[in-house]
Amino acid sequence: MELKIVITGTAAVGKTTAIQSISDRPPVTTDQAATDGLAIVKDTTTVAFDFGEIVLPDETIVRVYGTPGQERFRHMWEIIAEGALGFIILVDASRDEPVVDLDMYLANFQKNIAESSAVVGVTRSEQNPNVMNEIYQYLENQQLIYPVMAVDPREKTDMKQLLLSLIAMLECY
Amino acid sequence: MSDKKQIVIKKQDVESNLTRLLQSNEGIYAALLSSVDGHALAKQSSRDFSDSRLAAMTSSCLALGEKMALEAQQAGCNFVIIQNQDGFMVLRRVGDKLVISTMATKNVNLGLVLSATNVVAEELEKAIQN
């Protein structure tokens, strides 16, 4: 069996790092030098997609695609989302309005997520003690039931737990 | 290791080279210079199109073309060529951080478009002051 999963979220949230840490095979990245304000935060930015593969113990192959974070690459979001069975939305707690970011990505992929499922990974949560409660409250208000976890994209165990939560959600359908 | 160096190129060098590209062949109707991370920098065109959207798509397409070449164990992607029913689009990297896109009508000789794009890209590479 093969599953297609998409990781999305704002620029510099850790999507490329997450795929690099979780992939069982050398990942494909399409990073290019950042020439704008993003260069203050990171040297490169994803312009097409990141791609990694995970082989589960039952030999299920999970193909994970990471979207570019910046909105000017919206054309890639639509291409990548097609046929995806689940979405991992990474939210950067150190940004000004993490809940607004989450709302934007849920809205962008609304149609796809409605036909599949999603989980939320919160990065840099230690920099924003209230972020988890804010996200729980937001999801409750929206009547959405998605797992939410604080994660470090550099940690394979964190990302694998997030992925397995998503797969568990999919199995409920 | 990352390259944090800014690149500097004179506006008149960009404009003269894009003009030269359009004048090199009557089938070439547009040329766009953009950054590899998808920002439009300069455009010359006899047709109307969104340079910001095209610049972002150019960035994605060039990156994919270069990755596909590597996956197929082919080194050094020179051009990404998109052949359509009513024309061609040719993408070529300029130095490390820029890309030039040439758009031409369907009746053009593709070899001449590639050659003209290559000449202008090399001129722009010479004009870049690191």
Image (cartoon, grey):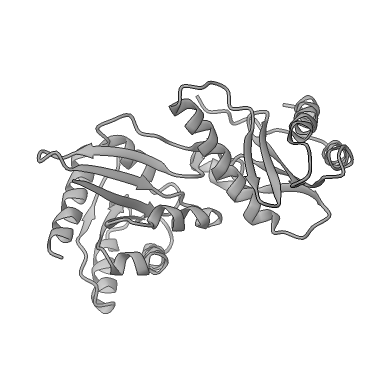
Question: Horizontal and vertical percent for residue A113?
Answer: 31, 65
B74 w.r.t. A103: above or below: above
Q: Which residue appears at 34% of the width and 64% of the height?
A: A112
Q: Quadrant of residue B31?
A: top right
Q: Quadrant location of the C terminus of chain A?
A: bottom left
Number of residue marks: 0
The residue under the point 89% across, 41% down is: B23
The percent position of residue B119, horizontal first and vertical second, equals 80, 28
Measured from the top left, where is residue A94 in percent x and y?
A: 38, 54
Q: Is residue B115 visible?
A: yes
Query: Relative to A42, is B93 on the left or the right?
Result: right
Q: Is residue A57 above or below residue A68?
A: above
Q: Residue furthest left?
A: A58
Which residue is found at the position 31% from the left and 42% from the top? A18
Along the line of sight, the residue nearer the viewer: A22 or A124: A22
Asked which quadrant contains residue B77, the reply is top right
Q: Position of residue B96 (x, y in %)?
A: 63, 29
Query: In the rendered view, would you say A63 is above or below B51?
Result: above
User: Which residue is at 40% across, 41% downward?
Assistant: A50
Q: Tell me if residue A14 can be seen.
A: no
Foreground pick, A159 / A81: A81
